[in-house]
Amino acid sequence: MKGIKVIQLAKDNQLTPVAGFKGLEGYVKDDMISRPGIELAGFMDFFDPLRVILIGSKENSFFQLFRKEIQEERLKEIFELKPPAVIFSVNVEVDEVYIRLGNLYNVPILKSNIRTTPLNSKLYSYLQEKLAVRKSVHGVLLDIGGLGCLIIGKSGIGKSETALELIKRGHILIADDRVDVYQKDVGILIGQAPQILERYLEIRGIGIVDVVSMFGVGAYRETKKIRLVVELEKWEEDKYYDRLGLDLETTKYFDTEIPKVTIPVLPGRNVATLVESAAMNEKLKYMGYHAAFNLTREITRSMKKNEVDDNE
């Protein structure tokens, strides 16, 4: 992965380039941010040149304690390693030495309009999302009643047709055909559509459908946390299918396991209703209510009560 271009980083985060314009076509490849302190004092042993540098009020005030010739010397050490960009928060004035060395070494100097702490958080979240390793999954991702549901299955099984029916019922499309999945953190999987496929569905026999034009802006959103995987497959006569919902099946993406439900498809079965019910049932489980466990518990209690009555 090449990373993300500095010019795109600047555009997406409302950063204004003030120097080093030739370096704007360079790439940011590391999702961590450097807040230099000891580096400005001359200790460079642990400096990572792949990281974006963020200069806030504290860093700048510390740097101003040194004489001008020392400042020049320290900054040259840093700029010679070609960091992808140096970003200044709103309350820090960009000194002439940064602008001159930025132009000399083609290191972009960017200015933000927000304070250091929120800027640091914003940049970190942005880089984590943009630089995360992605896995492309063939399927459809929907927001069903607030729960991210990834529908997978072989080509032609009816994933997109099911999604169209669910969108018609008021649920929300995230991605069709190809879902790009990345792990924001262990236990948190995010899905989104490739940019060129955003808001589109492909329906066999109809063609490409723009869900925003057809159902309104509320029918599409850009990303969603995946909480359930539903696999559609053709009914197999001799295959065992869980009828109570006591079998806890999961699937794994990266380091995160997600609950999985397998729904057999037969002519006459309303697959959209089944997927919707699976999502609502999973949502209840997250809220602490498990219908299958409750039923088996009640049956067990009833059987024990009958045994006691028989013994009496």
Image (tube, grey):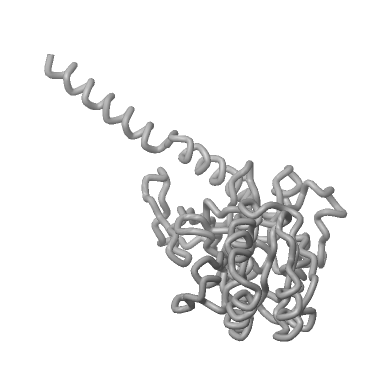
Tell me what residue is drawn at x 74 percent, y 81 percent. 23
In the rendered view, tell whether residue 223 sits above or below residue 35: above
Tell me what residue is drawn at x 47 percent, y 40 percent. 286
In the rendered view, tell whether residue 111 sits above or below residue 307: below
43 lies left or right of 50? left
The quarter of the rendered structure image containing the N terminus is bottom right
Tell me what residue is drawn at x 53 percent, y 51 percent. 227
In the rendered view, tell whether residue 273 sits above or below residue 64: above
Can residue 203 be seen?
A: no
Q: Position of residue 293 (x, y in %)?
A: 36, 36
Relative depth, front residue between 278 and 183: 183
Where on the picture, by quarter, is residue 93?
Answer: bottom right
The quarter of the rendered structure image containing the C terminus is top left
Relative depth, front residue between 79 and 222: 79
Can residue 170 be seen?
A: yes
Q: Position of residue 225 (x, y in %)?
A: 58, 53
Relative depth, front residue between 247 and 236: 247
Where on the picture, by quarter, is residue 197?
Answer: bottom right
Q: Position of residue 88 (x, y in %)?
A: 69, 63
Number of disc labels: 0
The extreme top residue here reads 312
The extreme left residue here reads 311
Relative depth, front residue between 251 and 243: 251
304 lies left or right of 67? left
Tell me what residue is drawn at x 73 percent, y 68 percent. 95
Q: Position of residue 232 (x, y in %)?
A: 55, 60
